[in-house]
Image (spheres, rainbow, N blue to C red):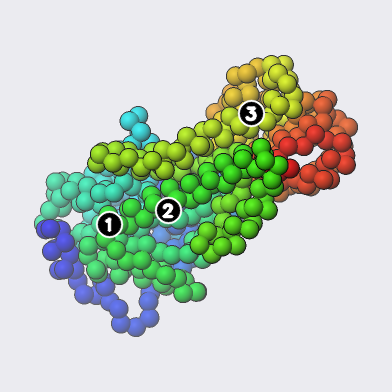
Amino acid sequence: MTQSKSMKQLSSQFFENNGPLKGINICVIGGGFVGLASAAGFAQFGHAVVCVEKDSRRLEQLMKGQLPFFEPELEELILRSIQAKRLSFTADLRQAIKGQRAIFITVGTPTGADGRTDLSALEEVTLSLSEVLEPDQIIVLKSTVPVGTGKHIESILSQNGRKNKPFAVVNNPEFLREGNAVNDFFRPQRIVIGGSVSEAVELVANIYKLGMSQPVPFVITNNETAEMIKYASNAFLAAKVGYVNELAGLCDLLGVNVLEVARAIGLDPRIGSEFLEPGPGWGGSCFHKDLKEFSGLAESKGYSLLITAAVLASNDRQHNLVVEKIKKLVGTLKGSKIGVLGLAFKANTSDVRESPAIAVVKNLLEQGAKVTAFDPKANGAAKEHLPALEIAESPYDTIRDSDCLVILTEWREFQLLDFKLIFETMRRPNIVDTRNLLTPELLSRFGFNYTGMGQT
């Protein structure tokens, strides 16, 4: 390809490998979860980072060192990086990429109306970059993108004035868990880098190597394989969650404790213990859209991913199973008062995208229940999705005079509540604990009717 050949002409000092690794200039486009975690992490490594965010309100917050969402430790890391003058924010893309060696793109890639990934934001950024890219700059795709996107971006750049000018496109998928992003960035299980230009891949690898205090496995491959690795990883993890949730449903019918089963099978190194915790279903910004894209990709090639389709159906059913557990305790939902603790899709985040809690609450409201809810960080975001939802100021206000308490997010602070007081203030002492967060024996002594997920 023309662009790959021209990359061989890159100045030797740009990829200087003699002597110790040194910090370089980096631009990160997109001030969302992945962009901010990456920008702050790279700055902590010793690189000089400028982050581009076009939303004026969010930009104003970021320039003050304030995070527009909740993620443990990230706001402190951003503030330290700003104070060290290694991280800055701007809305000016043209100015931001001047003198930068690597340009990381972290814009959103949501699901489109056809169920496939919407690349419009990425394409818009690429068109803007085609006008201002400098020689030898490297574009690094960190957004989750369909297989073949690297070539698609190369084509856009070539068709818009970059054909005979040196550039490279590299794919570097992220594996950051919401609620644990800072730790995941600094202690990754692996770093995947895909590209056709060895010098560009090496530079991206060196960006990480500069700051890694412990050895990290690097998977060096081509763009298409790197893109596939991300989708394959998320699809497998979603399947693992779906499996243990279905297992919990069967354990409920057989009088078996799923927690003991999950612990035992998780001790098998071929299976592993992570993602074997039953719950109301998985959520967040990744699994649902990535599985839809993965299935759509297969279908476009005349192939069916039966497991992926089953995992999506299983997760949807899990929401309904939670509602059925509630109905089994309270009888008819119409007119019943339900107190909900937890609205975020998981603990330690304010994200409610594809949250099973939102799906369950919506179902309860549609069946005529009066729902009052509380979440330590996600109340505002949940209210945007469910305007009719009543938000309480505290867990106790949520539960007072309710017919059933439902725990939908595994916030540890819910374990520390005064359940003796809760028993006295509830209209009917029913608890559906979809996260198996509480101790059934203790609650039974208080007099609660307790139902978990797959527990006797």
Q: Is residue 300 found left or right of 59 in the rendered image?
A: left
* Residue bearing mark 3: 323
What secondary structure is found at the residue carrying circle 3?
helix
Q: Earlier in the sequence, mark 1 or mark 3?
A: 1
Residue at point 35%, 58% (across, down) = 172
Residue type of the residue flagged with mark 1? Asn
**Relative to the observer, which residue lies in front, 397 or 111?**
111
* Residue bearing mark 1: 223
Q: Is residue 312 found left or right of 334 in the rendered image?
A: left
As measured in the structure, the alpha-carbon distance from the residue carrying label 2 to the one carrying label 1 is 16 Å
Q: In x, y percent, where is residue 355?
A: 55, 37
Residue at point 65%, 43% (across, down) = 251
Q: Is residue 200 found left or right of 340 in the rendered image?
A: left
Q: In x, y percent, where is residue 279?
A: 61, 42
Q: Earlier in the sequence, mark 2 or mark 1?
A: 1
* Image quadrant occupied by the N terminus: bottom left
Q: In x, y percent, where is residue 383?
A: 59, 29
In the rendered view, tell whether residue 253 sits above or below residue 169: above
The label nearer to you, 1 versus 3, is 3
Q: Residues within 10 Å of mark 3 (few under 14, many from 20)?
A: many
Q: How crowded is mark 2: few (under 14 residues within 10 Å), some or many (20 or more)?
A: some
As measured in the structure, the alpha-carbon distance from the residue carrying label 3 to the one carrying label 2 is 30 Å
